[in-house]
Amino acid sequence: MNMISLPSDVGLVRRLAHGGWWVTCQDEPQQAVVLDRRLQEVRRVCVPPSPGTAAYVVSPDGSLLAASGEDSVRVSGVDVGWSREHGSWSDFPPGLGACAFSLDGAELWATVRPGDPDGEWDEPDAGGGEDLDEAQDEGGWGDECWVLDAVTGEVLGRTSVDSEMSYSHLLAHPDGRHVAVVVSEGQDGSFGHWVRRDGNHLVKTPTDLLGRRDRSPVAVAPDGRHYLNQGWTTLSTHSFPSAELIAERRAAEVLSQGRPWNYVFGYYDASTVLATLTDNGRAASTVALRAPSLEPLGEVEYPVATRPRAVVCAGDGSWLTVEGTDVARWSLG
């Protein structure tokens, strides 16, 4: 176990794409600490205030910060700063956007709301993207996924997600080309698209071959060969890129509470998934599942008493726990 103690309670923990961590403290949200894989401090970074921000993400090298706000996507860094406006997520039906950097940090992927209720394009107040009609796939409806140049903010491609989302999240595939765009429709469930950029067009394929809109990706294996889907009452693994079903189990068979939505999932390594039950903002227990078969391997037992606020998988044979001011790195025995 490796551990670092920060000056105040830990706020956000973000894994950097090529190893290491981005951590903020609750008392100093405008100050972030970049840690290496072994939790040694590398540097400190100033986080600009982002009022109205739903979520923010960090570039793989920790040099850029992207924020998904109510009506814009913003990127800031030492020598970089831009904002792209879009329709407001507060418009009916209300929703939340998300963003994610590509693994090389050159592109920013974002889910956005179009600029008017009919989904027609409104010219955003930002540079680049001179012919935005060419940067959109034909067909589809609803909210959109954009790919933007991380340095200039130019729109490189866009496509509809076939839904008016209540919220979304993005999972970058290890191949560096695909991103899983997870679309939530609230009580109606969630589904996903695998999306890749081909020139100025985005090509999307379903993450579930049956077209179920109640099953969506929650984690991708670090070797990229399979991924984990979560449904209302089931867990399933699928091969990539075919999306063919590998294994499916009723959640009640492998999870003590039986409800996948109460769990946070992550790949410990390519052959093991950790499923952490959350209760009142704390990690109550963590079970290990063999991947891709989803065979239960047992509950994770810590050598010391701990009930962390969060468990975050690294995918390299380790995970982090956050408890108060402490961030600890663990491995299975």
Image (cartoon, rainbow, N blue to C red):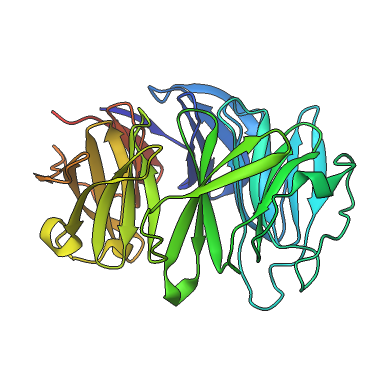
Q: Nearer the viewer, residue 113 or 212?
A: 212
Left or right of 204? Residue 123 is right
Can you tell which quarter of the image residue 135 is in? top right
Left or right of 306? Residue 197 is right
Number of residue marks = 0
Q: Position of residue 282 (x, y in %)?
A: 32, 58
Q: Position of residue 42 (x, y in %)?
A: 53, 21
Above/below status of 117 relative to 74: below
Q: Position of residue 112 (x, y in %)?
A: 68, 57
Left or right of 49? Residue 3 is left
Q: Residue furthest front?
A: 138
Q: Determine if residue 246 is in view.
A: yes
Q: Nearer the viewer, residue 152 or 204?
A: 204
Q: Position of residue 273 (x, y in %)?
A: 25, 41
Q: Residue at x 88, y 55 (%)?
A: 123
Q: Quadrant of the C terminus?
A: top left
Q: Residue at x 32, y 64 (%)?
A: 261
Q: Determine if residue 46 is in view.
A: no
Q: Residue at x 54, y 58 (%)?
A: 168
Q: Residue at x 70, y 54 (%)?
A: 138
Left or right of 222? Residue 143 is right
Q: Quadrant of the N terminus?
A: top left
